[in-house]
Image (spheres, rainbow, N blue to C red):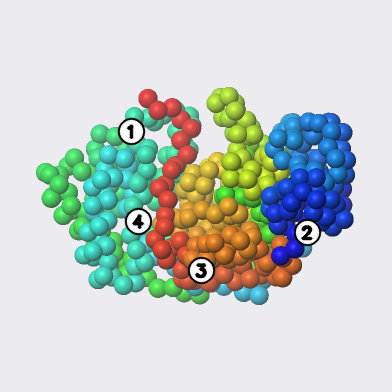
Amino acid sequence: MKARLIKLEEIDTVAIVTEAAQSGDVIDGITLLSDVPQGHKVALKAMKQGDEVIRYGVVLGYVNRNVERGEWINEHTLILPTQPPLSELKFVKSPSVVLPTPKRTTFEGYEVAGHRYAGTRNLLAITTTVQCVSGVVDQLMVRIKGELLPKYPHVDGVVAINHAYGCGVAIDAPDAVVPIRSIRNTIKNPNFGGQIMVVGLGCEKLTVERLLSEAENTKENVIILQDYEGYGAMMDALMQMAEAKLKVLNERRRTTLPLSKLCVGMQCGGSDAFSGVSANPAAGWASDLLVSGGATVMFSEVTEVRDGVHLLAERCVDERAVEKLKAEIGWYDEYLAKGSVDRSANPTPGNKAGGLSNIVEKAMGSIAKSGKAPIVEVIGPGELPTKRGLIFAATPASDIVCGPSQLASGITLQVFMTGRGTPYGLAEAPVIKVSTRNAMKEMWTDLIDFNAGSIITGVQSVQEAGEELFDLIIDVASGKKPAAEALGLNNFLCYFNPAPIT
């Protein structure tokens, strides 16, 4: 396809090429002065050292030398700007936003008594208190899948909540609240049907009492391996407990539920310069449809919103949300500073190869997946929301850390945008994979569920792609399997632990 330039805002001083181009090519009236890879930026005008480089209508940085019209602008050309100060963020009532109206307002899900949200899957989850027991639980999983699951056809599967936390940690350190609440809240994820099965060792620091209430901490829900005489006895007890849980789960059936019972997570990984043009805006439109229909949508990744935090503050519905936003982002600034880094450590080599020159550019594209809806609440990593609507969950940007954090906060389905490609998946919730460009879908036909590259080529508008993605979300919430789930691809649950390890 013939290359063209994509300019997003009138004041932008750079545009990205839709296809790789060569030096001397004339694209939309601009002669390229060097080869330019797909998705990378071209200077739309001559700039002097120190001039602003603008994309998305915001300053991505400043050129570190004189630049001619038609030059390739990349990470080696830019000086990173100062991040927006948190002290200046204040609540200001913004004009009401008119969201698109969804054509579908229900899905087929699993109601969970007493829970804000419903499940999109019917899973038996076995939670460990410490890594020491994961070997036993892994063998238990093999036996359950081979011996028990065939007897209970209405159960979608069994998952092990294995993790690296639980012992050798400063269990009472202030920041230990993050991994502890994350594990505790994951146990209650609606996809697990209200059934609790916890396996502990007996000498770990993360005791069962820190995860379950007194009423939940019973012999029907908890097995401590050190209470049993050998592996055989442990396994017999675990199989007996698992079967009791499976019998209950097998009685569950999908019912027609309002979108207010659905909680969806938005995440991106392996991003490129098209992320903020195609996949994320389409996800943003789908998000607005979900919120308009009463659903809850979470977006996350602190370092990938940091440079647009002022834009998020403008969308907060009240002062409490703004103050929580400042507190969570401020905490993360300090967390990074302790490691002698800042938000500029975020872009990966793949991000840069895909045209994202720095974290500011990545952030502007990342925020697009949140749509235009007002932000009703801000929560910390692994916290449970108290409201329905659009929620900012302040998690790390790492895919395998953000995912478990959103699971802990109650998502039952995730939409994952990617430009470079990743086989990422979650065993605990279905993940819809959205590609930013046609080439990604053509290369990974059997891994990508939805291609937003049609926006780049002009075949679809953001609205049309967003409507189609919304329909896919409802279908997957109602039982349709996306590629990662069908192929059994899932990642280890890496819970965020900022507390010391002793």
Q: Amino acid at mark 4?
A: Val
Identify the mark nearer the N-term, 4 or 3: 4
How many marks overall? 4
**SS assignment at label 1:** loop
Look at the image and tell me whether residue 272 can be seen: yes
Instruction: Check whether the beta carbons of the residues at disc 1 and disc 3 lie within 8 A of each other.
Output: no
C-alpha separation, residue under disc 1 versus residue under disc 3: 37 Å
- Of the residues under marks 2 and 3, which one precedes in the sequence? 2
Going 42% across and 47% down the picture, which residue do you hit? Answer: 493
Q: Which labelled disc corresponds to residue 476?
A: 3
- Does residue 394 appear to the left or right of 253 in the view shown? right
- Circle nearer the N terminus (2, 1): 2
Q: Secondary structure at mark 2?
A: loop
Q: Amino acid at mark 2?
A: Arg
Report the residue at 35% width, 56% height from top.
Answer: 159
Residue 427 percent across, percent down from the top left: 41, 57
| Circle 2/circle 4 CB separation < 8 Å | no
Q: Disc 2 and disc 3: Cα gap in Å?
A: 35 Å
Question: Disc 4 designates what residue?
Answer: 159
The crowding category of the residue bearing disc 2, from other C-alpha atoms within 10 Å (few below 14, some 14 to 19, many at least 20), is: some
Picture coordinates of residue 176, whole percent (x, y): 45, 33
Quadrant of the frame with the C terminus:
top left
Q: Which sits in the foreground, 278 or 260? A: 278
Q: Which mark is residue 4?
A: 2
Which residue is tagged 1? 167
Separation (CA) of disc 4 from disc 3: 19 Å
